[in-house]
């Protein structure tokens, strides 16, 4: 599904393989790569990764921006510190980082980003094939609660895109409350738009404004993404 993906075979920790310490490769689930590529970031653009975590998608974006700039945000500063270490290992250009709680504000960020990625917190139900223990901690009210949180974050972060800019919303969930229901509720401020992602196969994204990746169909974890 991702043209960048290479399956590492063999026993043991892949981080011990030759080249890892020198930044020759990074470890990433294939569907997560698709999300990074679906944003369609180009050389010279100004991009915001609103929920960057430890930066797996941030590093993919940084490779594509060349003379552009990337700002990576997360609620937790310790995750941003790990992101900075990964950027250094991969020998990528510096990435600006900022701790932001999108549920209360925008951290003073400008409204001039060409593209904004909102990989929102969610139930993680798309990863159950690898993490079945998730079911032990999910309650009946959690999908609706997390969907409401994702909507709040999406509205807040999307406000940093310039007029005519691009916003990509993504979750590693397969539940409608966290996916299509969120898209429907933000229709007052965001207009669905076909994916602008030339690195992905046309049969995957051409003419579509949203996409589901499923283990049984694509061999990836379960993801939902929507482009505005």
Image: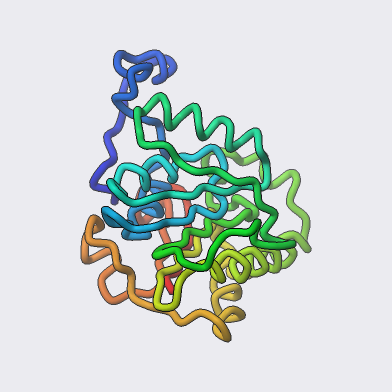
Q: Position of residue 129 (x, y in %)?
A: 52, 43
Query: Is residue 81 placed above or below 115 in the rendered structure?
Result: above
Identify the residue shown where x is 35% and y is 19%: 20
Decide which of 1, 154 is in the foreground and name it. Answer: 154
Identify the residue shown where x is 71% and y is 67%: 144
Identify the residue shown where x is 46% and y is 29%: 86
Left of 23 or right of it: where is 223? right
Decide which of 133, 100 is in the foreground and name it. Answer: 100
Q: Give the quarter of the figure containing the C terminus.
A: bottom left
- On the image, which quarter does residue 188 sit in? bottom right
Q: Position of residue 115 (x, y in %)?
A: 41, 63
State the colouring used for the structure image: rainbow
Left of 224 or right of it: where is 68? left
Q: Position of residue 32 (x, y in %)?
A: 42, 47
- On the image, which quarter does residue 155 sit in? bottom right
Left of 78 or right of it: where is 92? left
Query: Is residue 123 placed above or below 133 in the rendered structure?
Result: below
Decide which of 214, 160 is in the foreground and name it. Answer: 160
User: How many badges with numbers are in the image?
Assistant: 0
Decide which of 150, 59 is in the foreground and name it. Answer: 59
Q: Position of residue 118 (x, y in %)?
A: 53, 59
Query: Is residue 202 placed above or below 97 in the rendered structure?
Result: below
Query: Is residue 169 placed above or below 63 in the rendered structure?
Result: below
Identify the residue shown where x is 31% and y is 42%: 63
């Amino acid at each position: 599904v991702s043209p960048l993906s290479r399956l590492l075979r063999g026993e043991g920790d892949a981080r011990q393989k030759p080249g890892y310490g020198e930044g020759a490769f990074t470890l990433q689930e294939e569907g997560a790569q698709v999300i990074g590529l679906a944003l369609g970031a180009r050389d010279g653009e100004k991009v915001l990764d609103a929920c960057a975590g430890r930066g797996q998608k941030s590093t993919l974006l940084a490779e594509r921006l060349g003379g552009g700039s990337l700002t990576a945000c997360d609620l937790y500063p310790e995750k941003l510190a790990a992101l900075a270490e990964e950027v250094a290992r991969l020998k990528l250009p510096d990435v600006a980082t900022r701790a932001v709680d999108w549920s209360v504000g925008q951290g003073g960020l400008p409204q001039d980003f060409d593209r904004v990625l909102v990989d929102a917190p969610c139930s993680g139900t798309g990863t159950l094939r690898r993490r079945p223990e998730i079911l032990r901690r999910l309650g009946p009210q959690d999908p609706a609660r997390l969907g409401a949180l994702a909507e709040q974050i999406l509205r807040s972060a999307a406000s940093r895109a310039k007029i005519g800019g691009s916003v990509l919303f993504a979750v590693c969930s397969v539940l409608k409350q966290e996916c299509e229901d969120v898209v429907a509720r933000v229709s007052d401020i965001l207009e669905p738009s076909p994916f602008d992602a030339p690195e992905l196969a046309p049969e995957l994204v051409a003419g579509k404004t949203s996409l589901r990746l499923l283990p049984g169909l694509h061999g990836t974890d379960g993801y939902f993404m929507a482009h505005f």
